[in-house]
Amino acid sequence: MQINRLSDALGAEIAGLDLSAPVDDATFEQVREAFHAHQVIVFRDQRLTPEQQIAASRRFGELEIHISTRFLLADHPEVLVLSNRKVNGEYVGVENAGDHWHSDLSYKTNPSLGSLLYALEVPEIGGDTEWANQYMAYDSLPQATKDRVAGLRARHTFNRLRNPRVSIPEHHKGEAAQRYATLSPDDAIHPVVRIHPATGRKALFVSPRFTIGIEDVPEAEGQALLDELFAHATRPEFIYRHRWRQGDLLFWDNRCLLHLACRGIPPDQIRHMHRTTVAGDIPY
Ligand SMILES: O=C(O)CCC(=O)C(=O)O
């Protein structure tokens, strides 16, 4: 097994590991160490059935069933389909997943530990994904900002209608009110800075997609602080941008990263992916 770094900010490629077969415990421990050291790990040239992706993902923890049930695989609800393919005029997967910087499931009391995204079909142009290292974001804050955010807690919501920083996708506009009335879980309140349970390092834990306010801080002041933190969190030097190849399986750490789907796919090209999501702990 060979581990190659992908950027100064984060990311490593693990070569020579076939995840369609069981991975022995010693090798798996090396993978887990690489994951904690590099935050995103890339396995190239995989050929995985949904069962094999689920089995490989389960090595990292229990899997979540996403609240957008419409795009779960019928026989394997652990797999969420992300796709821009249309059949009979309807998308067959979530088309707009990741259109704003976020950490998966931070709207839940126990957000995700990490997510695995497997590329079945990739476009020739567009469809990249970016990750931003939130350890680096926290570490590089001015001391005065570190002091200011220490102990603060933020409110996260799934409901796009309650978040002026995000847009409603065109194909959801007609049904958005009903969609969010039925789909939205209660808000979650999390520390603005969390401690990674495995590494002990501090990471910023707010995002434009899900974080809508700071608790016990006047509204305008809280929004100004969020604007400042969001601008800082996604500075170019914290980012790794991935150009997908068919057969890539990426595993990323939601506890210390934000990510963004860069989109820009020509309308005649298809990007079709399977996501599994590993459950995580309550942030502290
Ligand atoms: O499709 C992508 O590039 C990112 C998807 C994403 O943001 C997600 O699954 O949470």
Image (spheres, grey):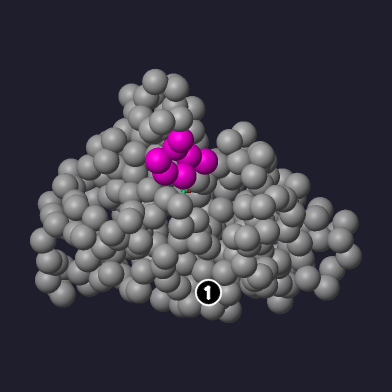
Q: Amino acid at mark 1?
A: Asn
Q: Which quadrant would residue 241 be assigned to in this image?
A: top left
Q: Position of residue 122 (x, y in %)?
A: 32, 33
Q: Tell me: residue 260, above or below residue 85.
A: below
- Report if residue 141 is visible in the image: no
125 to the left or right of 163: left
269 to the left or right of 209: left
Q: Position of residue 186 (x, y in %)?
A: 66, 70
Q: Which quadrant would residue 78 be assigned to in this image?
A: bottom left
Question: Which quarter shows the C terminus?
Answer: bottom right
Q: Which residue is mark 1?
A: 110
Q: Tell me: residue 171, above or below residue 255.
A: above
Q: Tell me: residue 135, above or below residue 241.
A: below
Residue lying at the far front of the rendered structure = 88
Q: Specify the principal SS of the magenta part.
A: loop
Residues shaded magenta: 90-96
Secondary structure of the residue carrying tag 1 is loop
Question: Which quarter shows the N terminus?
Answer: bottom left
- Report if residue 64 is visible in the image: yes
- Of the pair 244 and 178, the residue shown nearer to us: 178
Q: Position of residue 180 (x, y in %)?
A: 65, 55
